Image (cartoon, grey):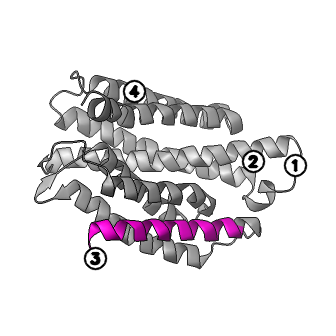
Amino acid sequence: MSIDLLAPVIALLYLAATGLQLLNIAQRQQQLDRRVVAIGTLALVGHSIIAWDGIFHGGEASFGFFKIAAMLFLVVNIACLLSLITRPLQNLLVVLFPLSALAVLVSTYAPDTDIAGSAPEGGLLAHIVSSILAYAVLTLAALQAMLVSLLDHQLRHRHTRGVVQVLPPLQLMERMLFELLWIGVVLLSASIATGMIFLDDMFAQQLVHKTTLTIAAWILFTVLLWGHYQLGWRSQTAVRFTLVGFALLVLAFFGSKLVLELILA
């Protein structure tokens, strides 16, 4: 099956898994639905083919805006499904899967925004991989922070129905958030370190905004982790730090690519 025909099939699989998970939420089912995992895994297989073909094609590599977005959502979904082995993160899928369906379709049918070049190797490849993994895990952390904020708001106003009955206890939700933050910060540290070692100049004109914003996000996440373990920061404080840090990362990565490839092109 060609990529052009595979993309809509993958999008439909993602939407079908989303519909099943929404039905589980409506029925207040807290157990992981194996049908959602099975359909989602099948979609991921096709998604990986599309993402890989979009970036590495004909012996060259293209890191255009839409191609990288498709790869990022692939890694986010894999990280989320792997996390389901030990943590109840399945409600995040109702956001991730529809966005992944859109990313697959846009990556397949939108024009390429970057000039293909030789595939990265060695240290540069390590920088790219660690960057994508860091963004993926911190995307999960940002979505988890939104759920923590929602649950905390409901509990503060003594609402005991609806989302409170579907989500895990607030303490567990917060613990999962900080676990994701720890992993994300470690990966982001690796991304910054490999960039400093293997990139010619991280503060070159086209990279200075990305580098500055990424370091600022790393500082925010690090301060949050320190504040949590030393000063007991949690709930809304953790949510604000997480979302601001994630916004800086989005601006650093997608913001710079959006300007360079779609606006100034």
Crowd rating for badge 4 (residues with CA inside 10 Å; few <14, some 14–19, many 20+):
some
Q: Can residue 2 be found in the magenta stretch?
A: yes
Amino acid carrying label 2: it is Leu
Horizontal side of 118 relative to 168 (left or right) equals: left
Residues at marks 3 and 2, CA–CA distance in whole angstroms: 44 Å
Prevailing SS of the magenta stretch: helix
- Mark 3 nearby-residue class (10 Å; few <14, some 14–19, many ≥20): few
Using the numbered discs, state the Cα–Cα distance from disc 1 to disc 2 in whole angstroms.
9 Å
Tell me where residue 99 appears, x and y as whole percent: 49, 54
Circle 3/circle 4 CB separation < 8 Å: no
Q: Please, what secondary structure does the residue beneath circle 4 have?
A: helix
In the rendered structure, which disc, 1 or 2, sits on the residue that comes first in sequence?
2
Type of amino acid under label 1: His
Q: Confirm or deny contact between disc 2 and disc 4 (CB under 8 A).
A: no
Q: Quadrant of residue 25?
A: bottom right
The residue wearing badge 4 is 213
Name the spot of residue 196 as percent of width and height, x first: 23, 32
**Left or right side of 250 for 60:** left
| Stretch of the chain drawn in magenta | 1-24
Which amino acid lies under the numbered mark 4 shown in the image of this protein?
A: Leu
Residue 85 visible in the shown view: no
> Which type of secondary structure does the marked residue at label 2 adopt?
helix
Residue bearing mark 2: 151
The three-letter code of the residue at mark 3 reads: Met
Nearer-N-terminus badge (3/4)? 3
Which dot marks residue 1? 3
Could you say which is closer to the camera, residue 161 or residue 122?
A: 161
Q: Secondary structure at mark 1?
A: loop
